[in-house]
Image (cartoon, coloured by chain):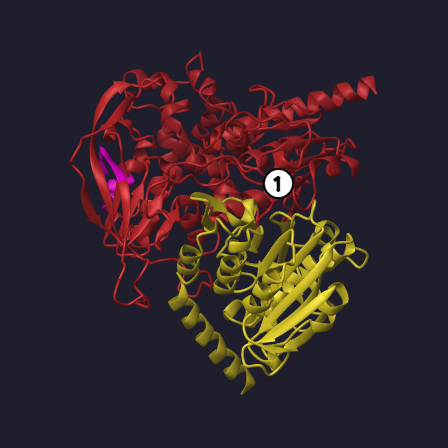
Amino acid sequence: MFKIVNKQKLNSTVTMMDIHAPLVAKKAEAGQFIILRVDADGERIPLTVAGFDRNAGTVKIIFQIVGATTMRLNEKHEGEFIEDFVGPLGCATHTEGIKKVCIVGGGVGCAIALPVAQKFHSIGCEVHSIIGFRNKELVILKDEFSACSDKLTVMTDDGSYGAKGLVTEPLKEALDAGENYDEVIAIGPLVMMKFVVATAKPFDVPTTVSMNPIMIDGTGMCGGCRLTVGGKTKFACVDGPDFNGFEVDFDEAAARANAYADFERREREECCNLFKKELK
Amino acid sequence: MAVQPKKREMPVQDAKLRARNFMEVALGYSEEDAVIEAQRCLNCKNRPCIEGCPVKVLIPDFINKIKEHDFEGAYSVISKSSALPAVCGRVCPQETQCESKCTLGIKFEPVAIGRLERFVADYHNKHFNGEPTLLKSNGKKVAVIGSGPSGLTCAGDLAKKGYKVTVFEALHVAGGVLVYGIPEFRLPKEIVSKEVETLKKYGVEIETNVVVGKTVTIDELFESGYNAVYIASGAGLPRFMGIKGESLKGVYSANEFLTRANLMKAYKDDAHTPIMKAKNVAVVGGGNVAMDAARTALRLGADNVYIIYRRSMNELPARKEEVEHALEEGVKFEVLRNPVEIMGYNNQDDKRDAKNGFVTGINIIKCELGEPDEKGRRRPVEIEGSEYILPVDCVIMAIGTSPNPLINKTTKGLNVNSHGCIIADESTGKTSKNGVFAGGDAVTGAATVILAMGAGKSAAEAIDEYLNNKRRIG
């Protein structure tokens, strides 16, 4: 059992938790993920590490309430426990040889992008961050990004905060203006990452994307998280989650991501009804 | 008294009924069945059956105890050699091991050793309430990586020698392939958890949610006071064929399909982990895992389940009993067939069509058997122009696994072969790294439960010897 030592609502659909998991906290690096089960009989879901405190032995997770499992997780209070928490899994984000980087985060993906930005910042790299959200209400972690970025651009789809538009726009402007990034790192919805790759490619700037496919064990056993990268079958849990964006088959990944859409909708509805009943 | 030529029949659930439920297929001998079958044992001088057993159970001795109605005595005999008798009695391929050597088997059917072992273990689990007698700790600590059959066997044997053993398991529950792979109807999870509980009574500690190679490394285990390490991390990543369509929705590796069904209990209506309940299922492969996947698909409600295998019925690598059970339950065997492509739904006019990207069929080509390969098995040769499409909505790839890279990537000095399997001495499990032993599928690639147990057993002896020598020298 793993204790929730801190819980904080970041916006109406995104929650942050610090979980006491000393073994994981000791090893976690930016770019890695964990697998958790909220309770016995629950499903195993992967969440990317959003931060860690090695001294306190805690690992930070930030999740969007999208499905039944994240709903159940969000129902847990500070001081309560979750059943299983295992990691850190996957490979850490590579930082070697990079002097100047552009981090592009979208929506809840910013939660994963933040420790990556912090890592680059801590090793003396010049960090430009572009973070995008649908609207002002959904903006998260702005101050944290500000603290670790040499340049920060906030975008919203409707212009209610920062500049109006997609994250690809300021990225293209920067590249057009001759910003010589050693790497672009994109973390967010598949479609966003696909277009960040399309934006960076003409400039031939290496672009890394963080993939978050359906997983079960997360340790290299089931093969559910397979992706086609450079024409080869790769497993996000052991080969990733970071991959060369130029080589990822995004359309296939997007199709596979909704394999259980029907089931998930039913589960979610059931879960909502359950909570409604509990409230009465 | 004349010897009964045939084994005492094993009571089983009716094939039609069981093909639709997840309850155990074979129901087990009654006390009467067991005693009658035990009496078939000739108690011959050579005792060849013991040689056929990878963990060297003193088979005639336990059978003699059954003859005397001393079922607990029989259990004591078995448990001296086997850490998991209730498991072995169910999943060992006895027909190619102990039973294949049985003297009675020369003229008649061999003694049903497996069924008797299962009976004894089940009897013990049902009736025994006592506590095992614990040995005094010798103060030495051993870490076992993986709680599958190999790891549990090694842990059990070492604990019985007085070692303090910790088993590290990556998943949330102990048992490895016994809980994520082998289905409930062949090996009920309750049996596995009972065996694990027994080991705990011997002082074995089990730490779930620890991925060695990630959460801790082997070097860190030594630093934290373990004197030796046994790697039994099992087989790893599933293999795919590299044909078109393998990323369509509805294509599973057998590992994923079985993990969803077994470990995550997706067969239950109230499970939180989904599984595709397909109507027409193709399983590619002919081993035990393929049979497990096919029979699980049937139980999840499929109307048609096909095994697609490139050689003929005679070459199927699965246990004969598993193939027979699958046939009885209605699994169809498309043998001498090889997949060429998996077909998917693609509505060009409507990109948002919810059916897009789901499997609709599998294109397979007929084969004939050609010249034998290096292993002596006749090679399948595709017959040009013989392709046809089998309409299915789910394809399960059960064509083996390649080793998990997590441990060797993070362990300096641990040598692996060109396939990525850990190189270990066959009789001791000794690896290239001092104090590190390995066995089971992590070394051999996908094999059987009992071979993995055999490796765990020899490694336990080798570790004991290694630590004793070290003590003398140090």
* Residue bounds of the magenta highlight: B325-339
The vertical placement of A165 against B101, above or below, is below
Q: Which residue is mark 1?
A: B199
Residue A27 is situated, as x and y percent measured from the top left of the image, at 72, 49
Q: Is residue A263 left or right of residue A91?
A: left
Q: Is residue A144 left or right of residue A250?
A: right
Residue A59 is situated, as x and y percent measured from the top left of the image, at 71, 59
In the rendered image, what is the letter of the chain coloured yellow? A
Q: Residue B388 is drawn in which quadrant?
A: top left
Q: State whether residue A193 appears in this view.
A: yes
Task: In the displayed orientation, state which residue is furthest to the bottom.
Answer: A280
Q: What residue appears at the point 70 percent right and 39 percent down from the top-left corner?
A: B217
| Visual hue assigned to chain B | red
Question: Callout 1: 10 Å neighbours few (<14), some, many (20+)?
Answer: many
Q: State whether residue A60 appears in this view.
A: no
Front position in the image: B36 or B446: B446
Front position in the image: B339 or A207: A207
